Image (cartoon, rainbow, N blue to C red):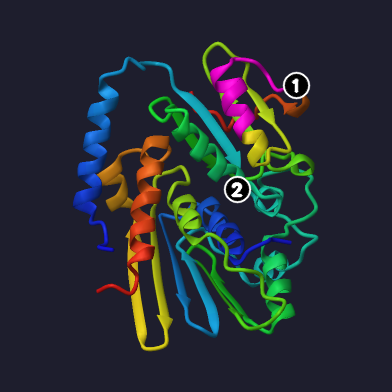
Amino acid sequence: MAKMTLEELRKLRGEKREELRKRDVEGKTIQVIVGMGTCGIAAGAKDTYEALLKVVDEKKLSDQVVLRQTGCMGLCYVEPTVEIAMQGMPTVIYGKVNAAVAREIVEKHLIGKTLLDDHIYDKPAADIIKK
Amino acid sequence: MHYALSDFVLDIAQNSIEAGSASVTVRIEEDEASFAVTVSDDGRGMDQAQLKRALDPFYSDGRKHAGRRVGLGLPFLRQAVSMTGGGFAITSERGIGTTVSFSFPLANVDTPPVGDLEGLFVQLLAFDGDYEFVVERSKVEGEKSGSYRLVRSELIDALGDLGDSGSLVLLREFIGSQERSIFVP
């Protein structure tokens, strides 16, 4: 298979942007932040990150979701941790988020606007969220 | 302890990003016998005393989490390397930067699996912040050899914000194509 070039990548991105411009998503950004410290990585945060990306893409939410990584959030005992900040929902940190819970977060929190009570561990650290 | 070799790379590279580096390079050289990694940064660096303490699992500088008593990233790595008969080296100079090199023999029964390298590269490149990140990947298999290079600034130029999940999906696709065609000139 031929290697994709940066030019081809740019073109693909352009096409995708054009597609997204057709939808009205102004100000509807959802921030999803995955803890990637030693603790998070050891507990499987890489799989969590991958699962979030996959489900967000599957549910066609990629025009709204910003997926970011941070270091340890200070909740090593419940890693992997995921913080969600979005309009109309309180900002929370979910703990023990494996791939299955990651799917639930997208389906219930991001789409269904309901909290996953069993996995809420904290309100966010102020330094993590970007205003 | 981390599950895969790619997890060790992510952990060590994340240290480099948090050390305030302007530029980080991760080089991965793989052949049939070994998996060798070099992570070098131009972050704040460490003096000899700090370097020694960084290898102690019961030490953390407390900068990020006040009162924390453990720092496990480097100690985990060193333990895994010594269990498998691999190699480990770290050099650092205050104000100049740090370089961590390690290698694992792939035939050793205790060597963890390599893990998902494509996912690793996506994550390495997608950490937040304004810095350069270069991934240099090479692989040798018998007479075949191949390599590719990923430069964060070029990818941001092509894709925009790498936190945007639409960009991340395309980035993964792009890296996948580089990895799959590694032996194709």
- Please, what secondary structure does the residue beneath circle 1 have? helix
Q: Which residue is mark 1?
A: A117
**Magenta residues?**
A103-117
Q: Nearer the viewer, residue B87 or B113?
A: B113
Looking at the rendered image, the quarter that the N terminus of chain B falls into is: bottom right
Asked if badge 2 and badge 1 are on a common chain, one would say yes
Give residue A47's mark.
2
- Residue under the point 46% across and 58% down: B118
Q: Is residue B19 above or below residue A94?
A: below
Compute the Cα span from label 2 to label 1. Answer: 22 Å
Q: Where residue B68 sits in the image (x, y, percent)?
A: 78, 48
Residue sitting at the far front:
A1
Residue A114 magenta-highlighted: yes
Q: Secondary structure at mark 2?
A: helix
Image quadrant assignment for residue B139: bottom left
**Residue B180, quarter of the rendered image:** bottom left
Instruction: Give the number of the disc on residue A26.
Output: none
The spot of residue A26 in percent (x, y) is: 35, 16
A81 and B115: which one is in front?
A: B115
Q: Is B90 on the left or on the right of A25, as rendered?
A: right
Q: Quadrant of residue A95?
A: top right
Kind of residue indicated by mark 1: Asp
